[in-house]
Image (cartoon, rainbow, N blue to C red):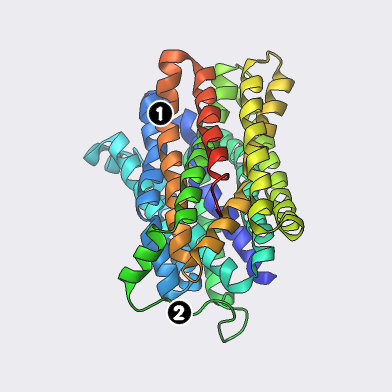
Amino acid sequence: MGIVVLMVFLSVMTYIDRIIISIAGPGIIKDFSLSETQMGTIYSAYLFSYTIMMIPGGYLADRFGPRLTLTFMALGSALFTGLTALGGSPGLGTYIGIVPSFLMIRMCLGICAAPMYPSSGKMNANWNPPQARARVWGWIACGAGIGGAITPALFSWMKARSGWRSAFLLAALGSAILGAIWCWYAHDYASERPRSIGPPPARTRTLWKELLTNRDLMLLTAGYFTVDYFEYIFFFWLYYYFGQIRHMGMDQSAIYTTLMWVAWMVMTPIGGWVSDRLIVHFGLRNGRRIVPMVGLTLSAVLVYVGSNVTGTLPTVILLCLSLGLAAATDGPYWAAAIDASGKHAGTGGAIFNTGGNLGGMIAPALTPLIAKYFGWSWGLYAGGIIMLAGVLVWFFVGK
């Protein structure tokens, strides 16, 4: 139980480190006269390096164990989150340029954060049987919702009083403390001897061939691409959309963005719990696919409706529900990927999450371009349309 709680807290801090820049974004745009497209590129820089280093991070979790890789993740993230406060500063910004300085720091942060979820998947596989993995992952994903819910309210308040740089320094301190606690407390297995998963094969080539030709893992990876594309529109642009496009005011937008994360926080453990219950009654294949197929379909419908209503409250409620239903599929997706990966859960989870983050890397930069030519409603519609393709893959998983 203690390990799960710590992984939840690591998930909280990872998401704070990841999305705090979206709260600082309007201030950075104003301070340095950046365009929306430039800011979108800075947002995507993290996802670029995070995605590229995901598979190496998962391999390291299989090779050295999740305890060490998560320690590296937390302490490295603390370092580069703190350094983000120097982005565009007279020294660094003058020497390499304002945008390049932010890009460099955010890419380094992405490298350090990459092992987080593959290593957590490895830990989940080490400690838990298949019928509990969606629930556990639901709580880990819930940590992301907690981090997302805390970030807009807390760091908007800090930004207003002490400037956006102080917010990054506080987040860095939290990550460093948590990394030290994890290193001291955690161990790779519930007992001294491995219970469910042994050491990886000595021949890495066999491992890669086994995973990259795994039909279910590849299908799940393609489906997760569509889900992450949709979710990252919300992560990086909803605060801006509420405040600047729907003219709700930045303070109110912070509150509404917090509600979005509350929806995530509530729905991820519910989705995982329901999925684990369904596999008891309907079997592993049919039970796992019900939550993603229903949740993603309803989510796509609600983002369309929420983008078209005129009232503030209906807009916020519908868009929050849309994200919550997409988030409910996280536990089933990860549990299915862990099951498909067998004893290489770290690397398999990394391949799977790499596919997801390719979608997440594209969405922050592509969405403002779609909005520029077709309007912000179409920026959101595109996410819903792409996500519907994620429903289709579940017809073929497990066949």
Q: Nearer the viewer, residue 338 or 24?
A: 338
Q: What amino acid is labelled 1 in the image?
A: Leu
Q: Which mark is residue 115?
A: none
Q: Is residue 302 above or below residue 64?
A: above
Residue shown at the point (59%, 36%) measured from the top left: 156
Q: Residues within 10 Å of mark 2 (few under 14, many from 20)?
A: few
Please, what secondary structure does the residue beneath circle 2 have? loop
Q: Nearer the viewer, residue 60 or 209?
A: 209
Q: Residue furthest front?
A: 399
Q: What amino acid is labelled 2 in the image?
A: Pro
Residue shown at the point (36%, 55%) measured from the top left: 53
Task: Give residue 244's position: percent from left, percent from top.
Answer: 54, 19
Residue shown at the point (73%, 21%) measured from the top left: 314
If the image is split into quadrants, where does the N terminus sit?
bottom right
Q: Residue furthest left?
A: 95
If you read the primary sequence from the N terminus, does the residue marked by circle 2 or circle 1 appear first? 2
Residue 389 visible in rendering: yes
Residue 30 visible in rendering: no
Residue denoted by label 1: 366
Task: Give residue 228's position: percent from left, percent from top.
Answer: 51, 41
Q: Residues within 10 Å of mark 1 (few under 14, many from 20)?
A: some
Task: Write down the quadrant of residue 311 in the picture.
Answer: top right
Q: Which mark is residue 199?
A: 2
Q: Is residue 183 above or below residue 390?
A: below
